[in-house]
Image (cartoon, rainbow, N blue to C red):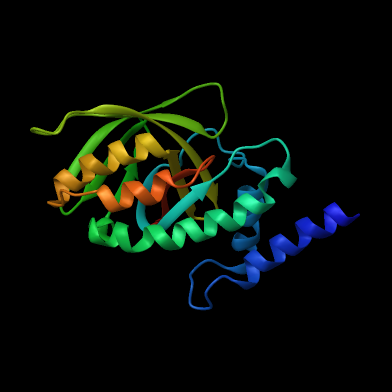
Amino acid sequence: MKKIHAIAVVLLAAVLSAPLASAVNPLDALKGAIGAVIGGSGTSKTIPEGTFKYAGPAVSFKSDNALQNLGGAAAGTALESKLAPYYTKLGLTSMTFTAGSDSTFVMTVKKMNLKGTIEYGSEAGVCVLHLQGLGKIVGGQFTARWQMVGNSLSLTFDISKLVELLSKIAAVSGKSSLTSLTKVLQSYDGVYAGFRLEKQK
């Protein structure tokens, strides 16, 4: 009973702490809180077709035991708050991610397009972004954990791969130094970090 009560408290706190001006309604916040605590990626097998606009940092955890992530969920919220100003400096506030029906994607930052394909495997909520090269920017493969909650898409990556991806985005946006951001990311163990994006109509 105490364990169930603890989970309920965490979920209620997640809903009540959502900003009043946020476009995410309380139900979506609750669904997101459940996803953060117990993991999961919804019922869709692929990322829905459409264009998604950057809405903020995202952090995820993966565990078969919800209780193992009760402390982690709080740490994830703290990390998202720390990441926000660094993402702003990188120019991510203007970033869009467009997923095509043919499993292609286009990530647009500062009017520059990073293109690639999305590969889905047998594990639900996991995909591989195959990023094409662009000029002097070398392409790469980035395993992402994705989750849809309402119209909100979260894409999170292993910390080392996120740093690699952000380095490529920084090259596009004209930013060069990721030292401070890298230190923040590497100070957290057992988390995946990335972006939360809202689907555009």
Direction from residue 179 to residue 129 in the image, left or right: right
Q: Residue furthest left?
A: 135
Answer above or below: position of 133 versus 200.
above
Answer above or below: position of 41 versus 198.
above
Q: Quadrant of the C terminus?
A: bottom left
The number of numbered discs placed on residues in the rendered structure image is: 0
Residue 201 visible at all = no
Q: Residue furthest top?
A: 122
Answer above or below: position of 69 versus 64.
below
Question: Picture coordinates of residue 67 (x, y %)?
Answer: 74, 46
Q: Residue furthest right?
A: 1
Viewer-nearest residue: 31 or 74: 74
Q: Quadrant of residue 198?
A: bottom left
Residue 87 visible at all = yes
Question: Picture coordinates of residue 163 (x, y %)?
Answer: 32, 40
Q: Residue at x 44, y 44 (%)?
A: 155
Q: Residue at x 17, y 54 (%)?
A: 110
Direction from residue 76 to residue 140 in the image, left or right: left
Answer above or below: position of 184 versus 84.
above
Question: Picture coordinates of residue 145 (x, y %)?
Answer: 49, 37
Q: Residue at x 8, y 33 (%)?
A: 135
Q: Quadrant of the N terminus?
A: bottom right
Question: Picture coordinates of residue 57 (x, y %)?
Answer: 41, 55
